[in-house]
């Protein structure tokens, strides 16, 4: 079950522009910074992602983050990288195809007239969850393999420059 803060953020994310999310990612509470940064990656706003990465490479903020039963301190740069890696995995493994196949399988089972009420409800619920996943994944397919490789290459260069020089230009 998502946290209350994340649930509220979903409402904001649905109506906020990229510029507004960028503002939240720079000036909001720690949770709002984290969620806004991740959302900008999902939306493929490359320029703003790189700008945020530079900002938080210089001004690192560790944010307690819970995913399921695991709690960790994450920096915004780590959140951006994790999201890019997740998108890369989703594209590489064609997660949309997996979801489509599972939907076909469940719809086929729903045609079985010998299902119990519990099974029927479970399959319907599963289809609803898969539809939400499909809608979310459709946004991520704006990314291409080349886009991801280029952004990751730039982030690696920024990391190297910061490690060698102790600073980077924010421009």
Image (tube, grey):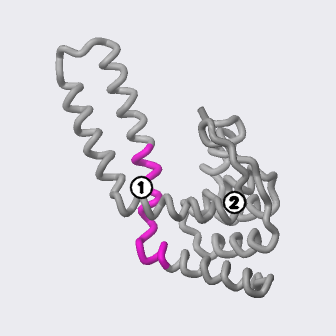
- Give the secondary structure at mark 2: helix
Disc assigned to residue 169: none
Q: Position of residue 22 (x, y in %)?
A: 71, 64
Residue 164 picture quarter: bottom right
* Count of numbered labels shown in the rendering: 2
Task: Determine the residue positioned at 75% across, 48% down.
Answer: 64
> In this view of the protein, which residue sits in the foreground, 79 or 17?
79
Q: Which residue is mark 1?
A: 138
Disc assigned to residue 21: 2
- Give the secondary structure at mark 1: helix
> Compared to 104, does 110 lie above or below?
above
Task: Determine the residue positioned at 32% across, 26% down.
Answer: 123
Range drawn in magenta:
133-149
Please identify the quadrant where the N terminus is shown: top right
Q: Position of residue 145 (x, y in %)?
A: 41, 72
Please identify the quadrant where the C terminus is shown: bottom right
Residue 17 in magenta? no
Answer few, some or many: residues within 10 Å of disc 1's Cα (few below 14, many 20 plus, some between 14 and 19). few
> Compared to 144, does 127 lie above or below?
above
> Compared to 60, does 32 lie above or below?
above
Q: In screen coordinates, is 70 left or right of 99?
A: right
Answer few, some or many: residues within 10 Å of disc 2's Cα (few below 14, many 20 plus, some between 14 and 19). many
Q: In screen coordinates, is 34 left or right of 110?
A: right
> Compared to 24, does 70 lie above or below?
above
Q: Earlier in the sequence, mark 1 or mark 2?
A: 2
> In this view of the protein, which residue sits in the foreground, 43 or 152?
152
């Amino acid at each position: 079950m998502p946290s209350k803060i994340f649930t509220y953020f979903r409402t904001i994310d649905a109506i906020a522009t990229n510029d507004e999310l960028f503002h939240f990612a720079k000036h909001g509470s720690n949770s709002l910074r984290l969620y806004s940064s991740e959302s900008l990656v999902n939306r493929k706003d490359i320029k703003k992602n790189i700008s945020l990465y530079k900002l938080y490479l210089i001004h690192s903020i560790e944010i307690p983050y819970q995913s399921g039963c695991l709690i960790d301190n994450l920096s915004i740069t780590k959140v951006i990288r994790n999201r890019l890696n997740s998108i890369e995995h989703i594209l590489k493994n064609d997660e949309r195809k997996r979801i489509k196949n599972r939907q076909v399988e469940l719809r086929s089972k729903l045609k079985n007239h010998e299902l119990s009420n519990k099974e029927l409800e479970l399959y319907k619920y599963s289809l609803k969850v898969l539809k939400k996943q499909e809608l979310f994944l459709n946004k991520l397919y704006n990314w291409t393999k080349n886009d991801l490789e280029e952004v990751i290459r730039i982030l690696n260069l920024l990391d190297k420059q910061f490690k060698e020089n102790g600073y980077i230009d924010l421009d």
